Image: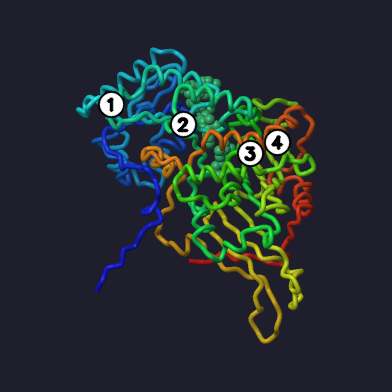
Amino acid sequence: MSTAIVRSPSDDRDLDIVPETGCLSIIVLGASGDLAKKKTFPALYHLFKQGFLQSHEVHIFGYARTKLSDEGLRDRIRGYLSKGEDGESEDLVNFLHLIKYVSGSYDQEEGFVLLDKEISRHESLRNIQVGTSRRLFYLALPPSVYPSVCKMIRSYCMNQSDLGGWTRIVVEKPFGKDLSSAEELSSHLGELFTESQLYRIDHYLGKELVQNLLVLRFANRLFMPLWNRDNIANIQIVFREDFGTEGRGGYFDQYGIIRDIIQNHLLQVFCLVAMEKPVSLKPEYIRDEKVKVLQSVLPIAPEDVVLGQYDGYKDDPTVSQDSNTPTFASVVLRIHNERWEGVPFILKAGKALNSRKAEIRVQFKDVPGDIFKCQSQGRNEFVIRLQPSEAMYMKLTVKKPGLEMSTIQSELDLSYGQRYQGVQIPEAYERLILDTIRGDQQHFVRRDELKAAWEIFTPLLHKIDGGEIKSLPYKPGSRGPAEADELLAKAGYVQTHGYIWIPPTL
Ligand SMILES: NC(=O)C1=CN([C@@H]2O[C@H](COP(=O)(O)OP(=O)(O)OC[C@H]3O[C@@H](n4cnc5c(N)ncnc54)[C@H](OP(=O)(O)O)[C@@H]3O)[C@@H](O)[C@H]2O)C=CC1
Ligand SMILES: O=C1O[C@H](COP(=O)(O)O)[C@@H](O)[C@H](O)[C@H]1O
């Protein structure tokens, strides 16, 4: 009997990536903060548990201004790591043992000299040849300190030479506040590091169903002829949260929902939905196509925007009383190219809404010559739910089971929890951190991509900052301002009536 070789799509990927081993130091800057404890350290722990980080190779350093001992940092993060575990597992003990804390400022050499000394000490304990070590700096910090921190890393903490080792820098969003500040930051970092050393992380690119988009679009014959202006009426990309800015009001008020979610997370999803097929899976080819589609987006018309701010947002003492910062926005993007001319893409995001959900909703056009008179029931829709409970489903018109010839809306449903029982879907950060260690930049944002993204939103953001477009009030726990639904209808979205999706049971 012959044994079938099952290849994963990545086996044939046209990537210039060599498997990497050897001494690895992961340095989390801003280790005392929110992101570090909630996302970065838990992601590292999951990688450790799965064997991607090996005790004999890896050491993890936390760095921040707060005075803490090694044990102090471990105590801070322990509860976030042990979620779902009974007591303190052997894995957890071993992982925490790898963590060391260094305290220092973000703009003085002393701290970074000390940090370098600690990293070098760990490297020499591993008896490695100078220059073969790998140093990964993760900036879990407010962007205001990126320039000084990067300068310090460049001056005092680089891997010494290039004998197969490397230094890589992971930076979080928001990367700038508009086109000019982003470009300034890019130029600054560009003087210190090469593009291949910089990893601009957008954690939406690490989500399972976002990573599935290219496979779905380009590995299925079914979708190829349909994915265009001839068949698709409109596409929504939606992010909803059922909680407000909670404890992050000070940060949020400076940025707002467009900079926090739409300009990065939703726009990345938009690229993958709208771009053309790349030459191959080589990261540069994929990013080239993303840039092209971003450059084809037309300037945003003011009548294609609805902004909202939930009642109670300004109760946060760190939020200014006359704030016009939107906590909700619905923005219609229009692409000027052969595939998408005339198809509105509605990007919508809001905090303190009635549910927590992120999804892509592709609505198809009406069937010409409808002999079943079923059009009023609703159109075909293909929905990709990114979270919670990953799923893809296709809303279809079918014959209502029974003796009569009547129609009803139903669905073809691929709910991951049901179809892939027992399969653990990795956290976005886990996947992306592993990519940085492997040197795979496919799921990271390139400099020109970032620039094109800011070019789309900067004129609108300046109008909002200048008070030219007002945020409309909405009730927490609602769908957002009613005007957003009106905008959706104006963009051509047709609501399905009387259809209720019944979640599958296991
Ligand atoms: N939290 C989240 O869920 C997400 C965050 N991000 C991004 O990740 C980065 C870090 O976010 P988060 O952890 O929430 O941020 P925090 O506000 O928790 O800041 C992280 C650490 O940075 C230091 N710090 C805070 N403010 C300043 C300042 N003004 N100047 C110098 N140092 C400061 C503090 O450490 P110390 O005082 O000890 O030095 C703090 O513990 C940001 O860019 C954020 O936008 C992205 C996605 C989600
Ligand atoms: O980047 C951010 O993302 C989170 C939402 O992430 P998710 O993976 O839970 O969908 C959002 O709450 C936060 O405001 C924003 O900065």
Q: Nearer the viewer, mark 4 or mark 3?
A: 4
Q: What element carries label 2?
A: helix
Q: Which amino acid type is shown beneath numbered disc 4?
A: Pro
Of labels 3 and 2, the one closer to you = 2
- What is the CA distance from the residue labelled 3 to the residue labelled 2? 35 Å
Which mark is on residue 298?
none
**Of residues 268 and 277, which is closer to you in this image?**
277
- Evaluate if marks 4 and 3 touch, with contact meaning CB atoms under 8 Å apart: no
- The residue at which mark 3 appears reads as 244
| Quarter holding residue 182 | top right
Q: What element carries label 1?
A: loop
Amino acid at dot 3 = Gly
Q: Mark 1 points at which residue?
A: 131
Is residue 232 placed above or below 334 in the rendered structure? below
Q: How many marks?
A: 4
Q: Is mark 2 within 8 Å of ligand 1?
A: no
**Would you name the residue on which mark 4 appears?**
326
Most distant residue in the bottom direction: 403
**Residue 367, image quadrant:** bottom right
Nearest the viewer among 48 and 6 is: 6
Quarter of the figure that contains the N terminus:
bottom left
